[in-house]
Amino acid sequence: MYATGQMLNTLKRIVQEVNAAADFEEALSLLVDRVREALSTEVCSVFVFDRETHQYVLMATRGLNQAAVGVEIPYTQGLVGLVGSREEPINLEDAASHPRFHYIAATGEERFKSFLGVPIVHHRRVMGVLVVQQSTQRRFSEEDEAFLVTLSAQLAAVMAHAEATGRLNAAVAHTGGGPLYFSGAGAAPGVAIGTAVVMSPKAHLESVPDRVADNIEEDIQAFKDAIHATRTEIQQVGKRMSKDLRPEERALFDVYVQMLNDDTLGNEVISKIRDGQWAQGALRQVILGYVQHFEMIEDSYLRERATDIRDLGVRVLAKLQSTSVEYNFPDDTVLVAEEISPAMFAEVPEEKLRGLISVRGSANSHAAILARARGIPTVMGVVDLPCMQLDGVQVIVDGYQGRLYTDPGSELLMQYRRLAKEEQAMLRGFESLKKLPSETTDGHRLPLFVNTGLTTDSVRSRERGAEGVGLYRTEVPFMMMDRFPSEEEQRDIYRQHLATFAPDPVTMRTLDVGGDKALSYFPINEDNPFLGWRGIRVTLDHPELFLQQVRAMLKASNGLNNLHVMLPMVSNVTEIEEASHLIFRAYKEVTDEGYDIQMPKVGVMVEVPAAVYQIKAIAERVDFLSVGSNDLTQYLLAVDRNNPRVADVYDSLHPSVLIALDAIVRSAHEVGRPVSVCGEMAGNPASAVILMAMGYDMLSMNATHLLWVKSVIRQVSLAWSKELLANIMTLDNAPLIRSTVELAFEKAGLGRLLNPTKRL
């Protein structure tokens, strides 16, 4: 039929035309026309599955009687129903002879013998069936079948988008079916019901061309004026929100302002203007350079800084271009955007904002941090969402399950309104737990620590009863500079965190860069950065950097002595021995300078499978172990946890993960070493109970989850948790394990604490 290049070009052209159609009906009409032409066949038809009536509806056809459009076929009948139920193509040279053939007189299809039908599937759900027919009795070629299968995969997203905006329901004359939901990552828990308001960037950096500056000094002044105006705007926004935010949350806006200072982004832009580039082009080059750099980072917390930098650039560019956009926010606003920044978040009047939805981003974005501080239900990373088509659509935000429902029916609305009331009562109950110990009903203490990266996290964590810091990421000051920070600069930053939690311990992870976290001033290019030169591998190759950082940590602990040092990405004992030698050397140097400090405890992050199999030898060489459950799960299951396409494969309750976790804690305790977990498992009430039963000595989590986990710990016994663990360790698949855990919590009367919306 086609050469490969010709087929690809035809597919691309059809998809582009369908996507550009004014409405869904026009899109399907274009589709059947173009497919019939491309395959030189006599008939092309599209059947859409109606989820309420469980029937396939003929939505568009070329070659069958047009009067038949709207005809319904029960999903159990005919060849169309067979394609849908089998979820695979059916290619017949004589359709009428097939036992499932179901003749519909209205279509006029009696003269067509050849039949090829392919399912249209979106996220394992059959959306419809694409059919071609021919009067000649023959099988369609393999190339024809491959063409239709490829095209149907593209059409699935178009149909899902149409369903999300209500256009598909309208097209099949159906308005009361089950609501469509889109999945993302729950970034701030809670339930919100409201009207979507889509916010788009005020300016587009990518569209700015390179251009020679007409007047360099005028361009520099215009840039400085734009910086000043942007700084003032952000300060005003922060001030307006100040009465609802603690000082540590307000400090996020200070971070924005600091980025605009002359010694950071400003100087680089001015330097490019002096080289002859006009102000807008210089801004674009600098901002997109930083964005590209941060987007390469695997660590989701640091990768989210790309959003902040892009938003700053867009705001400055808008000032340079004098661009202004006004929005009308209803009383029940759910803010929707391709990528939400803190400044976008703050533009919505506080009394009107109900929820946040972002196509890109994660729970580590500054917008998500602010959302959690304000108690705004948030879902990030909703990659398939047609957000530009959702303005004015009624939606439900489920921050627990990471879902966005569009055009929900009255029954679902009623259920979620009831759950929202129950949720508020539950959250009010959490407040009373702040000063109570994390202790089971039979007296077992399980300390709850926090993971931090921003100074703003620390104070909030303290207020929520955190007993220490299980993971402090030291990369941030390195990422935000155009050079390595000095020892003194590092000391000042580390001191703030150590002082906030003194006398409780603060575990500082040594510099975890390299590979996909290459610094702009320390570039590293690798084919597979996830398995490359990173973490302890980089710092051991550069002992001057390692020594300087450890010296800064030690000096920062002077008079406090609550520092713990943790080594990342360790895969063998030699790395521990080399790092320990350098830490002792730094300690001697600092004490020789007159500092009266204690030697800090040194530990290792267990996050690669190699460490699991050598855990006893590793534990014998350190003071403590901490399991990075996110990376360990990712590496054990060979799943990129940041890829939403395989998100359902990433499961921390996979039997292999549980077996590895159990082996780690047993081996560590055999040699008398405490072991903790500092990944997302620690902040999930169900997995927290399982980790407690395994014997983990401490859990470290996001501050938002601390009281939630404490509430569950205080309502169960250690004996009950051990019985649950014994049951699930005999099971061999993750879904069964998860359902067993949920059932156990339901029987114990704790089901609503696992996930208030799971029952829907």
Image: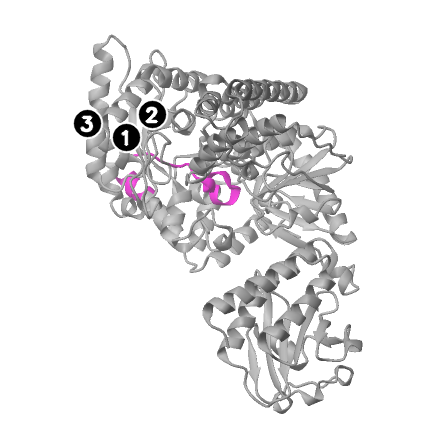
Look at the picture and state if 640 lies above or below 17. Answer: above
Look at the picture and state if 728 lies above or below 277. Answer: below
| Residue 601 drawn at (x, y percent) | 29, 25
Q: Kindly identify which residue carries mark 1.
A: 623
Query: Does any portion of residue 373 appear in the rendered image?
Result: no
Q: Kindly identify which residue carries mark 3.
A: 581
- Quote the CA–CA distance across marks 2 and 3: 16 Å
Query: Does any portion of residue 569 appear in the rendered image?
Result: yes
Counting labels gives 3
Neighbour class for label 3 at 10 Å: few (<14), some, many (≥20)? few
Residue 485's disc is: none
**Is residue 309 rendered magenta in the image?**
no
- Quote the CA–CA distance across marks 2 and 1: 9 Å
Look at the picture and state if 219 lies above or below 96. Answer: above
Looking at the image, tell me whether mark 3 or mark 1 is earlier in sequence order: 3
Looking at the image, tell me whether mark 2 or mark 3 is earlier in sequence order: 2
Give, as a single range, the part of the protein colored magenta: 665-688
Q: What element carries label 3?
A: helix
Looking at the image, tell me whether mark 2 or mark 1 is earlier in sequence order: 2
| Residue 23 drawn at (x, y percent) | 73, 58
The residue sitting at 57% across, 67% down in the picture is 151
- Quote the CA–CA distance across marks 3 and 1: 14 Å
Q: Kindly identify which residue carries mark 2.
A: 564
The residue sitting at 55% across, 62% down in the picture is 12
Q: What element carries label 2?
A: strand
| Relative horizontal placement of residue 609, taking residue 418 as reference (left or right) | left
Mark in the foreground, 2 or 3 = 3
| Relative horizontal placement of residue 679, taking residue 253 as reference (left or right) | left
| Residue 206 drawn at (x, y percent) | 54, 39
